[in-house]
Amino acid sequence: MQWTKNYPPGIRWDADLTVKPLYALIDDAVAQFGGNRAVDFLGKVYTYAEIGKLVDRAAAGFQKLGVKKGVHVGLFLPNCPQHLICYFGILKAGGTVVNFSPLYSEPELMHQIEDSHTDIMVTLNLTALYPKMAAVLGKCRLKTLVVGTMTEVLPFPKSLLFPLVKGKDIARVPKDARHVSFSSLLDNDGRYSPVPVDPRIDVAVLQYTGGTTGVSKGAMLTHANIYANTLQARLWFTNLEPGREKMLCVLPFFHVFAMTAVMCLSIMVGAEIIMHPRFELVPVLKDIDKKKPTMLPGVPTMYTAINNYPDLAKYNLRSIKACISGAAPLPLKVKQRFEELTGCRLVEGYGLTEASPVVSCNPLEGVNKEASIGLPLPGTTITIVDRNNPARLVPDGEPGEICVSGPQVMKGYWNRPEATAEVLLDGRLRTGDVGYIDPDGYTFIIDRMKDLILVGGFNVFPRNVEEAIYKHPAVEETTVIGVPDDYQGESVKAFVRLKKDQALTADALRDFLRERIGKHELPKHIEFRDALPKTMVGKLSKKELVAEEKAKYEAGKRQAAQ
């Protein structure tokens, strides 16, 4: 474990990682920081003591609905107080949380509800949410909808104005046995029946993912998995001051990164969560300037948007002292520019759903190596194995598949023993990412195995090409994929979004790239677009572009055959 020699001062790889039931985060925060501000939702403030009482009442309410061990409850919510309250209320009631993305289509929702055995769902009476759930309510095993409102969590006078100003965004909800209001869920004295939990055995969250292979699957994350990962992140961020931090939360709680590294970490250190329903640039900048958050976890596209905002000088960003970027590679230019603007340390981390999710991170104090995902967190071991023979470890510096072991690694995939056996091998989680470890113990990702482009027998890793394109001063965003090629098998295609008021041609970009990447890596096709597809957390997505190019190729073949 050569990385331990480069650990920052005060951090031990063999640190104590004693785990508890995940809801102990709330109980401990109430005991230690009860009078502190816990949540600021668009100006509505809750203390930790108030949140603790609401969680207990939610637990009692869920138990009245039949929630106990083995019962799965879905959360179909944006960032809002109801999400946090119900998340921990479900766990205290003995149930398992199933996170659902509000971006899902009806078929995706149907699949996940049936696959996860979700019988109760929590949502809001917003037209962007409720109609989707109403549409599937009678078509699948879902039996009960708990429906909240925005007015019950907004401050005065926003709570009065919302129905007037946003009336068209409010859905009509029937009053019948299948619908339970959030307010009635909480209409009790908070005396729930405590449920014994074995943190290492009992599943706290079913977090759905495409996984390292195949269709969407539910990663079984135990109480111990998520608690340990929260504790690992807490140990890594040595400069956090319990009870004095403010976390600006714009990443969605239904995504595993925000669930652990934002929501759970904030509660563990008694931080105030400045909660936004989603990332909107100007409101975020205003809150940084006004409310002075000290932490801002995000994704590279978010930091890019801040860096390039033309009126950024109007806002003081200097309150931020630490940021972790995840979910996608962080371009060096983006990191350097954001650090110049804020004076904070922006470090790149790495994780995946199956690891709760954080695996490694660059240190706040110490060396941040360009393009590295840093050092394994305490208690975490990264190994590199032969891609064709995963039982064989490869020497340092040699590329192979990244594997992870540690207390944060999932129990397995829900009801999918074969898929579990494919990724959990000899106590190690196979990530599907290709990388290597340098002599100092820093891990470098070359790319996803599934994203590898084979050009005439040569391997091309999209990340290498993307990093080179990002060095052009006119480029705002880019993503690179392989497209079908009758001669070479595949060829490289780059999709590029330019900065405002910038111009660039495909030939000029290729000329720029020739000195920076190999001839076989040079994009044969370059397409400029006004926007590039993104995932639910805002990272650039290749999936839609790959499907689009494949459809174009097949249509061309059909036309040629006619």
Image (cartoon, rainbow, N blue to C red):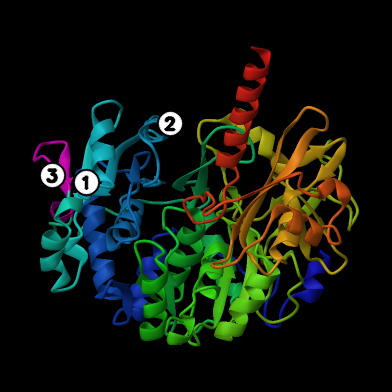
Residue ID for mark 1: 146
Q: Which residue is mark 2?
A: 115
Residue 83's spot in the image, x, y percent?
Answer: 32, 57
Label 1: state its secondary structure. strand
Please tell me whether mark 2 sits on a helix, a strand or a loop.
helix
State the residue position of label 3. 172
- Seen at 68% across and 70% down, the residue is 473
Q: Position of residue 323 (x, y in %)?
A: 56, 74
Amino acid type shown at disc 2: Asp
Mark 3 or mark 1, which is nearer to you?
3
Q: Nearer the viewer, residue 265 or 172?
A: 172
Q: CA distance from mark 2 to mark 1?
A: 20 Å
Q: Residues within 10 Å of mark 1 (few under 14, many from 20)?
A: many
Looking at the rendering, which quadrant does residue 176 occupy?
A: top left
Q: How many marks?
A: 3
Question: N-terminal of the two: label 2 or label 3?
Answer: 2
Give the residue at the far top of this rendering. Answer: 562
- In the image, the segment drawn in magenta is 171-185
Whether pointer 2 and pointer 3 mark residues with C-beta atoms closer than 8 Å, the reply is no
Residue at screen point 67% across, 13% down = 561
Quarter that holds the C terminus = top right
